[in-house]
Image (cartoon, rainbow, N blue to C red):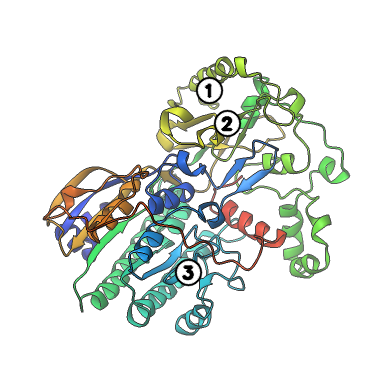
């Protein structure tokens, strides 16, 4: 934690010195989804069926994006606390849309499509958030439509609004358990960490200074929240759902699969496809002439969906677009790379060609070849770590995971899944990305002081928080109670095995096509989707 060591974050330093701290291991992959769901359920992704924001549906070739509907029947932390008579307040949980019906409140984070959606439970909170923040916003605008300086400015604006909302909730809507989430650290890191390593000395110095400024302000904002908490006794947990890592080199994974004969594309049949027109490219032109919103308002969604979405990172055709528009020749495709990893086109899929008896050999063949890929620029070793789904997950949904996952170059390389026109295998990446080393701090009532913990997992948080309330965690959780952080090991007064989830608060069948596009654009802007 360099900023803490440099004295930039005295408030965070005081929390560490007054409590227990250590590295918090995230899920694999270390992404917002599945990490936040593994946190709230205490379960590994194999018990939830979530391995990324998206997955390739087994019964079809549809791309499924996860949201709160997928844990509607799961007993999350707040469900269990509610069942034992404790009220809960959940603010800005990134993946909690639509919000669940809780005894208290739940305010969705950036997977809510807009502030016009029902992103709060109860609904009456929307107006209050608008009032106290001067216009509530879901997230800092990001993506290639914004310069780095604009993103930094957006992050500072949102940070101030987050703190205003949190102070209001702590003072006026206080509950027995409160979870408050800042996401600006993630947005700033995506945007600036790569630039901190730039060969341009001025750019690197600017990025480092902007990161220092943001974390300085954040530390002060946390201090303001602690002032409110100081009026009563409390136990505080500080966590991140993942860590961050420089990731400025990209490998075109689907192009590699094409080169090796595992993936075959169809030739474009539509005029738009042949011309290479995408929604992103068209939108860029329309925006420059001031017609983007007008055209979006008059073009039917059925027509708009026929135009591929386009890409953020890298050049070429998006694999999601190609699947959407029928551009993959499944009859000749053995494997395809999507967000999360490589999927084998097995015969239990509609046009699958890989027989069950050939699966293990093919997967091993692809994994071994990919493990030995070299840097397309100079032929040097890329240090690829291969991860097979059964080795990292357990539970009823393991077969829904990508067949092959990997870490390239210790996280410094990222896979680019779109298809470049010139068949190259390398491009630089703009956005930094995650690694598995998050942060953990516990302090306050009943917590030891000045100690360090090793081996904590994000799945341990919910069992540990329940234990702090005297609730024995359900037996199906993979996480453990971190007994070593407590001055006295918690005593259980009740058992949480019989809890029933309250379900999702939702007035619709799900996202509209327009809302789904808004979410995808947001994920692209953060580098989660090509």
Q: Which residue is mark 1?
A: 370
Q: CA distance from mark 3 to mark 2?
A: 34 Å
Left or right: residue 530 compared with residue 322: left
- Residue 234 quadrant: bottom left
For numbered disc 1, what is the local secondary structure? helix
Other residues around mark 1 within 10 Å, as few (<14) / some (14–19) / many (≥20): many
Nearest the eye: 150 or 525: 525
The first of marks 1 and 3 along the sequence is 3
- Labels 1 and 2 touching (C-beta < 8 A): yes
- Residue 103 quadrant: bottom left
Is 504 above or below relative to 455?
A: below
The first of marks 3 and 2 along the sequence is 3
**Percent coordinates x, y for residue 448 in the rendering:** 13, 56
Q: Which residue is mark 2?
A: 342
Is 368 above or below relative to 412?
A: above
Question: Which numbered tag is attached to residue 107?
Answer: 3
Q: CA distance from mark 1 to mark 2?
A: 11 Å
Quarter of the image with the C terminus in it: top right
The residue at the far bottom in this view is 131
Residue at coordinates 66% horizontally, 44% vertically from top-left? 63
């Amino acid at each position: 934690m360099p900023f803490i060591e440099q004295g930039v974050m005295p408030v965070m330093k005081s929390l560490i010195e007054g409590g227990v701290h250590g590295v918090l291991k995230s899920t694999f992959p270390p992404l917002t989804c599945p990490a936040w769901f593994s946190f709230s359920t205490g379960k590994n992704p194999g018990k939830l069926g979530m391995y990324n924001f998206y997955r390739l549906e087994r019964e079809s070739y549809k791309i499924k994006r996860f949201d709160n509907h997928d844990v509607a029947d799961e007993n999350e932390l707040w469900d269990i606390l509610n069942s034992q008579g404790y009220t809960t307040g959940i603010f800005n949980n990134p993946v909690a849309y639509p919000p669940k019906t809780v005894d208290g409140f739940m305010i969705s984070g950036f997977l809510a499509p807009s502030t016009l959606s029902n992103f709060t439970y109860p609904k009456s909170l929307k107006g209050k958030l608008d009032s106290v923040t001067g216009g509530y916003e879901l997230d800092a605008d990001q993506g290639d439509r914004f310069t780095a300086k604009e993103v930094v400015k957006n992050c500072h604006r949102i940070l101030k609004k987050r703190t205003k909302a949190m102070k209001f909730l702590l003072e006026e809507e206080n509950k027995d358990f409160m979870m408050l989430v800042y996401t600006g650290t993630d947005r700033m890191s995506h945007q600036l960490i790569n630039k901190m390593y730039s060969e341009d000395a001025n750019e690197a110095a600017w990025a480092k200074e902007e990161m220092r400024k943001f974390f300085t302000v954040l530390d002060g904002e946390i201090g303001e929240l602690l002032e409110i908490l100081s009026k009563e006794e409390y136990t505080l947990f500080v966590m991140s759902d993942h860590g961050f890592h420089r990731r400025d080199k990209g490998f075109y994974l689907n192009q590699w699969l094409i080169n090796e004969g595992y993936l075959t594309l169809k030739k474009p049949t539509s005029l738009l496809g042949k011309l290479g027109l995408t929604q992103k490219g068209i939108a860029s032109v329309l925006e420059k002439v001031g017609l983007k919103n007008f055209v979006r308002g008059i073009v039917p969604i059925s027509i708009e969906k026929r135009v591929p979405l386009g890409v953020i990172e890298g050049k070429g055709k998006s694999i999601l677009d190609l699947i959407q528009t029928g551009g993959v020749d499944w009859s000749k495709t053995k494997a395809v790379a999507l967000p999360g990893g490589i999927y084998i086109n097995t015969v239990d899929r509609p046009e699958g060609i890989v027989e069950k008896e050939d699966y293990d050999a093919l997967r091993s063949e692809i994994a071994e070849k990919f493990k030995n890929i070299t840097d397309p620029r100079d032929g040097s070793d890329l240090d690829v770590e291969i991860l097979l789904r059964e080795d990292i997950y357990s539970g009823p949904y393991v077969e829904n995971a990508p067949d092959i996952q990997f870490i390239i170059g210790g996280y410094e390389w990222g896979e680019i899944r779109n298809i470049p026109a010139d068949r190259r295998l390398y491009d630089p990446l703009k956005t930094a990305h995650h690694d598995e080393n998050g942060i953990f701090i516990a302090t306050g009532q009943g917590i030891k002081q000045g100690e360090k913990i090793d081996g904590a997992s994000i799945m341990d948080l919910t069992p540990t928080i329940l234990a702090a309330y005297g609730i024995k965690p359900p037996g199906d959780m993979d996480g453990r109670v971190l007994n070593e952080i407590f001055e006295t090991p918690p005593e259980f007064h009740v058992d949480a095995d019989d809890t029933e989830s309250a379900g999702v608060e939702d007035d619709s069948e799900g996202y509209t096509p327009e809302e789904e596009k808004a979410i995808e654009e947001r994920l692209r802007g953060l580098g989660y989707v090509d």
